[in-house]
Image: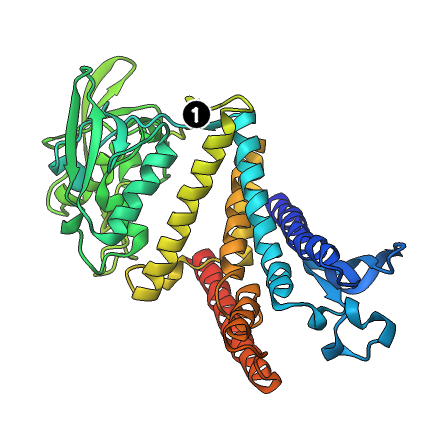
């Protein structure tokens, strides 16, 4: 329940900050252009608090904190006194109206830069890009535990987050990728991930596993943490604290080797021979795994169960991205550019079918990630805020009627043809835009529910 309330709280903080900043952009530029702003509301619905300034603008905090809006004087929304016609939004030159519409996304971009800058000044903890256990495609390409990744596709990387994002992008595009590494002996090497060999129908959730790269902090020692009562492991005499050295002929170096070895060698006809270390002594114990009644042909559930689980291991950060106030400026600019290209690339992949629409996330996922980011500390939460703010900027600039990008499209057409788009066309466009937006929100919400259910 604490996680639920934490998620709700940090979602409200996130939306409150970002939406307020977005609408503040519209508000500031509208004021600078001489437009009268009637209302600036944080949230929708009934006002819980409000006050009016000397310019006649009502500032309000409303009951439903899931957005906000700026209401400007406009003849299309009601009668305007003749003395104030020059302050009506619709009477302003098209260039000023474009500036007002673009101001919201622009302020989100400014927020992104500021959040990244502050994140670097505070110092963002992360993992060093040093490989732990390697398998699948990475193992076949010659990558080894202890390799330090220094560049991915020619782009220098300092942390595991940077390296993994670049690898995943190339994986979704099925492009072979060159990585510069320094091996455990200190020798610089160039290695190639043959990502073009990945199956085209591979789900993104399985993509990371099939690539086979993970940081050393994610390595899990093959030490038994729990033994299920009345299980094959319990009957064989396995105990918590036992270190598994080998299963049959397979040597075990990491816990990830354990399930694969069990599935490959298990049989109802003869027991598995497990070599373990207990209190410094080597023992060999026979164990006969049991068939899993939940196993299916799709291979998602293991066919054989032994009844053991690993000791929990806390992966601790061993790197910090930290820069002084001046040095953090170009870093924030570079991070904003990199994240922008990643976001636009993901949108392109979803439109072209290279990436699944399951990547769309809704308010539930945002709330969960907001909570988990906040628990990791201020730098990680700032990173989250920056990414969401950037996503809002890009989303609002899409040429969809009802969004800022749709308004900009109308104004661009007006600029080119010399007259406004007809009111009938604008209304039709708004219906289309609203339908499309609701469909995207519904799909995102469906993905959230599906993710929780699975």
At x 75%, y 63%, the residue is 35
Tally the numbered discs. Answer: 1
Whole-percent x, y for residue 105 in the image: 57, 55
At x 52%, y 36%, the residue is 116
Whole-percent x, y for residue 453 in the image: 45, 59
At x 71%, y 58%, the residue is 33
Q: Is residue 154 above or below residue 284?
A: below
Instruction: Report the side of 107 relative to 322 (left or right).
Output: right
Whole-percent x, y for residue 190 in the image: 15, 29
Neighbourhood count class around disc 1 (C-alpha, 10 Å): few under 14, some 14–19, many 20 upward: few
Viewer can see residue 377: no
Instruction: Report the side of 68 relative to 435 (left or right).
Output: right
Q: Secondary structure at mark 1?
A: loop
Asked whether 367 or 44 is in front, the reply is 44
Asked whether 136 or 65 is in front, the reply is 65
Asked whether 249 or 1 is in front, the reply is 1
At x 15%, y 37%, the residue is 192
| Residue placed furthest toward the bottom | 424
Whole-percent x, y for residue 287 in the image: 20, 36
Q: Is residue 184 above or below residue 108?
A: above
Viewer can see residue 283: yes
């Amino acid at each position: 329940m604490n996680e639920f309330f934490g998620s709700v709280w940090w979602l409200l903080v996130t939306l409150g900050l970002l939406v307020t900043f977005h609408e503040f952009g519209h508000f500031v530029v509208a004021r600078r252009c001489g437009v009268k702003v009637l209302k600036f509301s944080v949230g929708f619905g009934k006002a819980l608090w409000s006050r009016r300034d000397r310019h006649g603008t009502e500032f309000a905090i409303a009951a439903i904190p899931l957005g906000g809006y700026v209401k400007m004087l406009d003849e299309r929304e009601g009668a305007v006194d003749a003395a104030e016609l020059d302050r009506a939004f619709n009477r302003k030159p098209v260039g000023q109206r474009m500036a007002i519409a673009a101001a919201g996304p622009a302020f989100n971009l400014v927020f992104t830069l500021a959040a990244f800058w502050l994140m670097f000044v505070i110092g963002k903890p992360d993992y060093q890009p040093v490989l732990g256990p390697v398998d699948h495609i990475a193992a076949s390409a010659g990558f080894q535990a202890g390799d330090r990744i220094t560049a991915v596709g020619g782009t220098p990387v300092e942390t595991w987050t940077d390296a993994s994002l670049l690898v995943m992008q190339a994986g979704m595009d099925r492009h072979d990728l060159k990585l510069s590494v320094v091996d455990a002996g200190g020798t610089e090497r160039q290695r190639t991930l043959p990502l073009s060999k990945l199956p085209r129908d591979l789900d993104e959730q399985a993509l990371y596993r099939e690539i086979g790269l993970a940081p050393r902090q994610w390595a899990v020692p093959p030490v038994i943490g729990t033994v299920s009562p009345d299980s094959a492991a319990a009957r064989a005499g396995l105990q918590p604290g036992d270190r598994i050295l080998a299963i049959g002929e397979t040597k075990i170096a990491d816990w990830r080797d354990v399930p694969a070895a069990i599935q490959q060698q298990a049989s109802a006809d003869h027991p598995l021979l497990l070599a373990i270390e207990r209190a410094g002594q080597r023992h060999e114990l026979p164990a006969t795994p049991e068939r899993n009644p939940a196993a299916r042909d799709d291979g998602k559930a293991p066919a054989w169960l032994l009844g053991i689980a690993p000791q929990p291991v806390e992966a601790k950060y061993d790197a910090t991205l930290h820069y002084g106030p001046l040095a953090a400026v170009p870093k924030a600019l570079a991070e904003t550019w990199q994240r922008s290209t990643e976001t636009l690339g993901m949108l392109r992949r979803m439109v072209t079918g290279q990436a699944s629409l399951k990547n769309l996330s809704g308010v539930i996922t945002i709330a969960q990630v907001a909570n988990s980011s906040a628990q990791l500390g201020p730098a990680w939460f700032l990173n989250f805020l920056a990414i969401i703010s950037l996503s809002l900027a890009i989303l609002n600039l899409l040429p969809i009627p009802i969004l800022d990008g749709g308004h900009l499209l109308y104004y661009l057409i007006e600029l080119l043809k010399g007259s406004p788009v007809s009111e009938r066309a604008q209304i039709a466009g708004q219906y289309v835009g609203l339908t499309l937006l609701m469909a995207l929100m519904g799909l995102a919400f469906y993905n959230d529910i599906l993710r929780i259910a699975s």
